[in-house]
């Protein structure tokens, strides 16, 4: 993992605690630096690696997220949170086989569903028998009869990167898990991810909707629902889902970025550009709380401005696309310097 070489939290007495506080106020970029420092101070701290990975994913940096999450998985192979996050980041990076593997690792590491790893998926009778056995031994049996077999059933597999049998096997496993506990939102999230991997977006939408019904205060699930709606050519509904995510977590860079993409899909390129500018500003550390901790809280009048973590090239590329569609070549040219300040002014946004 390539740590930031100029990290102001490296000598903080409790960078992990500081990172948690920064997450609470939506200061994602500062939280990343805090968790990096926590990992450097104690490389064996598994939770710090996991949260570093989760936060990098929120910050629209899946490549770095995967590196951190792999370290967390190495330190605790049974950590279901790391497996789930790896599945999402691998899917975003088009590592589809690794995404499916991570979903299975989540399932087989989960105490409630681990017995499913001994099931031969080639024989439906084996699945039914294992499910019945797991249900009978499980203490979380509420809502089992409410599971709808029509929800999340693939209509047809079109993925260019996965074999239909691979997707069917994982789908069957998670349907069996849902029979065990239909009220587990994570099972529906996993089924939603499988739907996206299979390019069966209705399957993904149905399962993410079920997941947010169970856990409506989870910004990550709302964002996944929005992204899947957008992929299914339902961008107006996607924007509503992204708004839910941002209401819960205003500093959610990925949701803000996705909002911009959705407005582009609708042809409202000015609105798209405004959201993308906000996303880049946030990714660079653009909140009052982060400014205070990244160097803005104690300097004199001659102090250098606080350093900002770099934004990703991909974010600027998407912004440039919007600016080109707006026929604002002047702004396209200015974008190559990757200085967000003139864009904040152009779109009437406050620069903290």
Image: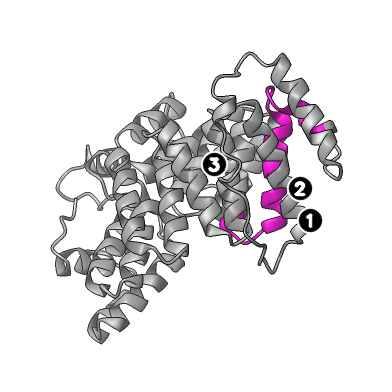
CA distance for labels 1 and 3:
20 Å
CA distance for labels 1 and 2:
6 Å
The question of residue 178 being in magenta is answered with no
State the extent of the magenta-drawn residues as a range. Answer: 91-117
Q: From what the image shows, is residue 151 above or below residue 343? A: above
Residue 251 shows in this picture: no
Which corner quadrant of the image does residue 279 belong to?
bottom left
Q: Which residue is mark 3?
A: 189
Mark 2 neighbour class, 10 Å CA radius: few under 14, some 14 to 19, many 20 or more: some
Q: From what the image shows, is residue 279 above or below residue 184? A: below
Mark 3 neighbour class, 10 Å CA radius: few under 14, some 14 to 19, many 20 or more: many
Label 1 sits on a secondary structure element that is helix
Closest to the observer, 345 or 89: 89
Residue 24 shows in this picture: yes
The question of residue 106 being in magenta is answered with yes
Front disc: 2 or 3: 2
Mark 1 neighbour class, 10 Å CA radius: few under 14, some 14 to 19, many 20 or more: few
Question: Where residue 101 appears, x then y in whole percent?
Answer: 73, 47
Residue at x 70% of width, y 27% of height: 113
Q: Which residue is mark 1?
A: 165
Instruction: Evaluate if marks 1 and 2 touch, with contact meaning CB atoms under 8 Å apart.
Output: yes
Residue at x 74% of width, y 28% of height: 131
Q: Which residue is mark 2?
A: 169
Question: Where residue 206 appears, x then y in whole percent?
Answer: 49, 48
Front disc: 1 or 3: 1
Nearer the N terminus, badge 1 or badge 3?
1
Closest to the observer, 313 or 251: 251
Q: Which mark is residue 40?
A: none
In the rendered structure, the answer to whether residue 7 lies left or right of residue 323 reads right
In the rendered structure, the answer to whether residue 60 lies left or right of residue 85 reads left
């Amino acid at each position: 993992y390539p740590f930031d070489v100029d990290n102001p939290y490296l000598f903080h007495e409790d960078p992990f605690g500081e990172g948690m506080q920064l997450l609470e106020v939506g200061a994602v970029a500062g939280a990343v630096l805090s968790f990096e420092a926590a990992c450097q101070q104690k490389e064996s701290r598994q939770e710090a690696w996991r949260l570093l990975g989760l936060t990098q994913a929120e910050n629209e940096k899946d490549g770095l997220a995967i590196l951190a999450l792999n370290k967390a998985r190495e330190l605790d192979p049974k950590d279901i949170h790391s497996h789930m996050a790896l599945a999402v980041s691998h899917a975003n990076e088009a590592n589809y086989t690794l995404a499916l593997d991570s979903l299975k690792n989540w399932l087989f590491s989960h105490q409630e569903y681990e017995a499913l790893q001994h099931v031969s998926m080639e024989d439906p009778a084996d699945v039914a028998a294992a499910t019945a056995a797991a249900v009978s031994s499980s203490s979380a049996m509420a809502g089992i009869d409410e599971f709808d077999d029509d929800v999340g059933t693939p209509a047809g597999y079109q993925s260019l990167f996965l074999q239909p049998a691979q997707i069917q096997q994982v789908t069957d496993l998670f349907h069996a898990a849902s029979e065990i506990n239909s009220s587990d939102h994570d099972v529906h999230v996993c089924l939603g991810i499988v739907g996206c991997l299979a390019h069966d977006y209705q399957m993904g939408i149905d399962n993410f909707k079920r997941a947010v019904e169970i856990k409506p205060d989870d910004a990550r699930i709302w964002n996944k629902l929005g992204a899947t709606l957008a992929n299914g050519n339902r961008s107006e509904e996607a924007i509503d889902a992204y708004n839910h995510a941002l209401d819960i977590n205003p500093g959610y860079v990925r949701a803000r970025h996705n909002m911009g993409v959705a407005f582009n899909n609708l042809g409202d390129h000015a609105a798209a550009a405004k959201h993308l500018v906000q996303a880049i500003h946030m990714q660079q550390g653009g909140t009052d709380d982060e400014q205070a901790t990244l160097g803005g809280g104690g300097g004199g009048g001659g102090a250098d401005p606080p350093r900002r973590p770099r934004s990703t090239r991909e974010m600027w590329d998407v912004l440039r696309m919007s600016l080109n569609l707006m026929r604002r070549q002047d702004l396209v040219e200015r974008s190559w310097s990757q200085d967000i300040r003139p864009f904040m002014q152009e779109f009437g946004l406050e620069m903290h």
